[in-house]
Image (cartoon, helix red, strand yellow):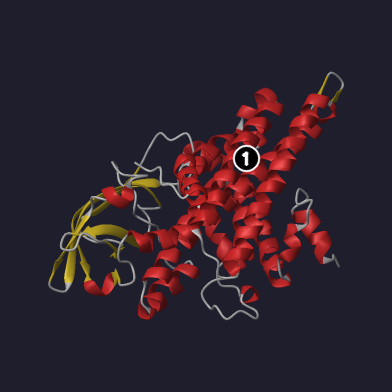
Amino acid sequence: MSTKAEIIRELYPEDVFHYAEKLTDGELEVLQHVRQIIENDIRPVVTDHWERGKFPFEAFYKLKEAGIMNSPKLFEGRDDKWKASEMYNAFLYYELSRFDASIATFYTVHGGLGYNTILIGGSEEQKQEFATKIRNFEWQTCFALTEPDHGSDIAGGLGTTAERKGDKWILNGEKRWIGGADTADIVPVFARDVEDGKIKCFIVRKGAPGYKAVPIPNKISLRMVQNGHITLDNVEVPEADRLPNINGFRSVNEIFIHTRADVAHIANGVTAGAFVAALRNTTEREQFDRKLAGFQLVQEKLARMQSNAIAALGYSVRIAELMENGEYEMFNSSLAKMHNSLRMRETVALAREVTGGNGITLETDVARFFADAEAIYTYEGTHEINALLVGREITGIGAFI
């Protein structure tokens, strides 16, 4: 029977500083199960779906068999009944994105953005109704904040409106780049109350009259994720489906502290996945009668990729520890997302470089990481927005216009 250390080395050989030893035995067992599902069910179909720009729903939902959000193994000795540990969360994103960024992104929309919106913004009754079904994968959710004309400036620019009439609200406006918007069972929609001007959140249920979501075509990145353009035309939402604890953008930022850290973990996983794919390809392929990995220039690039991977993992692990201890700071999440995304972007380029012409084909895995990294670099706070947040914190001077 393999020891914990042997299991970790098999799962994550690039974790040379042994960060994964911080996982509990139960958490590691769940992640082992996730790996089995990835290799047996998702990997065989991922290239075809990426090429066609379709999401592999049937294969993805096999992950619920591992109990990635609700396995009892994740809650042994925990007081929190809704969320597993932040360390497990970091490694779950690492595991998913180390394989594929679209799979990890779809999950973070559901299990990160959507789920955290319910936990942070919802009443106890709403948590019981919505969060229970989300964590069981009985319902799919998403997160409708970004708009066609407002992305980075959404805090002041959000234009979708909500008008209360009796015991219901009327929503009007548009949202864009909303992952899973066309298939979600419940959609948390952020809209500005026309009466007090505050941003509030409303649960729009599947089939609501006036709700329309159309996938955005012709993408070069995260092709499998069905990012939707949402139109809200006098959509009615009962007051009972308004999340009472979302009152202004400060509440939204509380969600972002969690989810920006999640995307830092995704960038970390993409970095590791690109490195692992490059290492595999260069140790298998020969040129000039020797393995590509036997050339000095290639080894230098592989060493940089390994360095980037373990540095990004260090950021993820540390912010996971801080958050588990109750330190939820936007500075930490923004710093980690900024750093890990930069290292990711460098690493996928190096991986593409060392695999040569083959690196632009999906068969090497490198091409998917290379293309998908561009979306990871931008969403959940662009590099520039995160840099300004960090800069404001360290200088005490706000540079936002």
Position of residue 282 in the picture relative to residue 78 (left or right): right
Looking at this rendering, what residue extends furthest in the top direction? 288
Helix, strand or loop for disc 1? helix
Quarter holding the N terminus is bottom right
Q: Quadrant of residue 21?
A: bottom right
Position of residue 79 in the picture relative to residue 238 (left or right): right
Looking at the image, is 250 positioned above or below residue 75? above
Quarter holding the C terminus is top left
Q: In the image, what residue type sits under mark 1? A: Arg
The residue that mark 1 highlights is: 343
Q: Residue at x 67, y 68 (%)?
A: 27
Position of residue 371 in the picture relative to residue 173 (left or right): right
**127 vs 341, nearest the viewer:** 341
Q: Quadrant of residue 91?
A: bottom right
Looking at the image, is 310 positioned above or below residue 66? above
Q: Residue at x 39, y 46 (%)?
A: 227
Q: Residue at x 78, y 57 (%)?
A: 18
Q: Position of residue 88 (x, y in %)?
A: 63, 64
